[in-house]
Image (cartoon, rainbow, N blue to C red):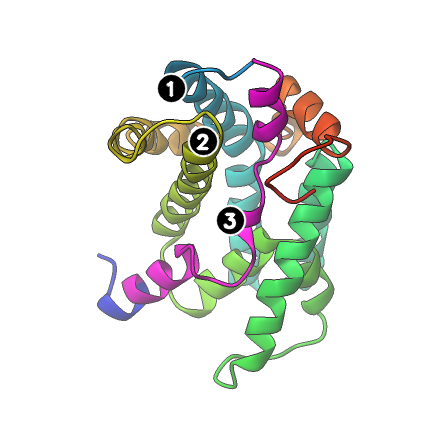
Amino acid sequence: MLEQTALLRLMQLISPSLPVGGFTYSQGLEWAVEAGWVASGEAFADWQRHIITDTLGGLDWPVLIRLYRACEAGDSGQFARWSDFLLAGRETRELRLEEQQRGQALSRLILEWPDLPHDDAWLPALRQSQLAGMAWLGRQWAIPLEALAMGYGYSVLESGVMAGLKLVPFGQQKAQGLLRELSALLPAAFARAGLLGDDALGGSFPLQAIASSRHETQYSRLFRS
């Protein structure tokens, strides 16, 4: 059972108000809408299903599991290895910069909180990946791994839906329906992610990679590149 304090810390970690700048990124969606690839709520839902299956299920969650286990073992070397692996798995310059910028923002928060241990051996990995910071804080705050993974997955979906609300666009009622529909897919996708061996990691969503690379030079943009 998730204890109340751990639940509150999880809610803090996945809140859009966490100052890591997640709301400023569309992860390629802005160009996909501009190109006509995502022109309706249904097309947007299909785009998000690919992110759940290919990105969350193939890369983010399996790496989160390994980062969390490294924290449990006190193994900063393995922690750094998997943080490097995650960054290498981001397929465009834009996606890599986003991961690094979010990681740097979260690591600054960690350093400001005096009740957390500050060990220089862990800092480089924390600074280059938000996911590393979430795994490390999850362990420090006794947030169970599955709850942490579900919270992270929901935050990814929520960021995507909020970007879709501005770009596709669709209304608030549609947005809430999409969150309800898509979040129901998370538990089964996480269960599959937990079965992957190291050699099977590295999910890819080629259309997102193309859209993200094109977004880097898109003339008119709402979202950060």
Q: Position of residue 13 (x, y in %)?
A: 42, 60
Mark 2 near mark 1, Cβ–Cβ under 8 Å?
Answer: yes
Report the side of 216 relative to 110 (left or right): right
Q: Quadrant of the N terminus?
A: bottom left
Q: Position of residue 146 (x, y in %)?
A: 36, 46
Q: Earlier in the sequence, mark 1 or mark 3?
A: 3
Q: Which residue was labeled with disc 3?
A: 23
| The magenta stretch spans residue 25 | yes
Q: Is residue 149 above or below residue 15?
A: above
Report the side of 26 relative to 180 (left or right): right
Q: Earlier in the sequence, mark 3 or mark 2?
A: 3
Picture disc at residue 41: 1
Q: Find the distance from the CA under tag 1 to the CA under tag 3.
A: 19 Å
Q: Which residue was labeled with disc 2?
A: 164
Q: Find the distance from the CA under tag 2 to the CA under tag 1.
A: 8 Å
Magenta extent: 7-36
Dot 3 falls on a residue whose secondary structure is helix
Residue at (28% x, 62% y) in the render: 7
